């Protein structure tokens, strides 16, 4: 925790969120943070990942291994560019999610992310501890921020400033609504749901739906619910 805070501060990042930490910030973590103890002291603690990312419009999760259900993937550099693009053009909250030191993020947690990012380390020895991973990705964010002028010229045609994306909490409510509706119609078997919701999450994540599009989808589901009842 302390080493991760130090890695963040050296790259100009300050907002540390902890999800259900086994050990809460203590004297040892503050000591390891060296001159970044303020990051530890000002960190926010959440009981779940859902709470931590509820107000975010972009969530990127770190993953060291390939998954059976492939997800939109970013290199560290593209991750830095994507985060700076989102923050500078939309002025919204963005989360870069790191997993547990030993086992990383679960499949369920990774499915709550818009993108996955991995560090292309030496395949014969790719072991990076958490603080090292934080340092690498924070460095890429820093470099993207320093190159903001060059990046802005690449984004001119994307019109992102005119786009409104929903926060994660609204997206999760949509997925709950969608799953309930598919269960009611019998499209999903409650006893054998399979990977249908996971694949639908991937579909909508890949499309990066906008707020107006989400409103339309919720309206469609509500219409179906009225017919069913």
Image (spheres, grey):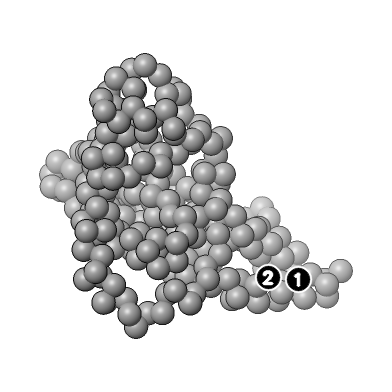
The one of 111 and 188 positioned closer to us in this rendering: 111
Specify whether residue 102 is in view: no
The residue that mark 1 highlights is 222
**Is the Cβ of the residue at disc 1 closer than 8 Å to that at disc 2?**
yes
Q: Is the residue marked by circle 2 packed among few (<14), some (14-19), or many (20+) residues within 10 Å?
A: some
Above or below residue 106? Residue 73 is below
Residue visible at 40% across and 46% down in the picture: 97
The one of 108 and 193 positioned closer to us in this rendering: 108
Residue 196: which numbered mark, if any? none
Q: Position of residue 114 (x, y in %)?
A: 44, 60
Residue visible at 34% across and 22% down in the picture: 29
The one of 3 and 196 positioned closer to us in this rendering: 3
The residue that mark 2 highlights is 218
Specify whether residue 208 is in view: yes
Q: Secondary structure at mark 2?
A: helix
Left or right placement of residue 227 versus residue 191 in this view: right
Count every numbered label the image shows and give the total: 2
Left or right placement of residue 106 versus residue 200 in this view: left
Q: Secondary structure at mark 1?
A: helix
Q: Position of residue 16 (x, y in %)?
A: 40, 39
Q: Position of residue 212 (x, y in %)?
A: 60, 75
Residue visible at 49% across and 74% down in the picture: 163
Question: Toward which corner of the image does residue 186 lie, by quadrant?
Answer: bottom right
Above or below residue 89? Residue 117 is above
Q: Which residue is farthest right?
A: 229
- The N terminus - image quarter: top left
Question: Toward which corner of the image does residue 147 lie, by quadrant?
Answer: bottom left
Residue visible at 30% across and 59% down in the picture: 79
Q: Position of residue 18 (x, y in %)?
A: 45, 35
Above or below residue 17? Residue 198 is below
Question: How far apart are the two marked residues, 1 and 2, measured between alpha carbons?
Answer: 6 Å
Left or right placement of residue 68 versus residue 175 in this view: left
């Amino acid at each position: 925790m302390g080493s991760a805070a130090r890695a963040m501060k050296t790259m100009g990042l300050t907002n540390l969120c902890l999800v259900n930490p086994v050990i809460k910030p203590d004297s040892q973590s503050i000591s390891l943070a060296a001159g970044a103890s303020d990051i530890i002291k000002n960190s926010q603690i959440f009981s779940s990942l859902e709470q931590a990312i509820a107000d975010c419009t972009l969530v990127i999760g770190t993953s060291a291994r390939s998954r059976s259900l492939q997800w939109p993937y970013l290199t560290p550099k593209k991750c830095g560019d994507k985060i700076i693009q989102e923050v500078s053009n939309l002025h919204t909250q963005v989360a870069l999610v790191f997993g547990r030191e030993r086992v990383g993020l679960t499949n369920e947690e990774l499915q709550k992310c818009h993108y996955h990012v991995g560090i292309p380390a030496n395949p014969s020895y790719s072991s990076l501890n958490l603080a090292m991973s934080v340092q690498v990705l924070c460095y890429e964010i820093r470099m993207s921020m320093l190159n903001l002028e060059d990046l802005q010229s690449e984004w001119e045609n994307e019109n992102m400033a005119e786009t409104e994306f929903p926060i994660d909490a609204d997206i999760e409510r949509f997925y709950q609504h969608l799953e309930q509706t598919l269960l009611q119609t019998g499209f999903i078997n409650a006893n054998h749901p399979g990977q249908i919701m996971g694949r639908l999450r991937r579909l909508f994540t890949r499309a990066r739906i906008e707020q107006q599009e989400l409103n339309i989808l919720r309206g469609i589901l509500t219409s179906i619910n009225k017919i069913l009842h």
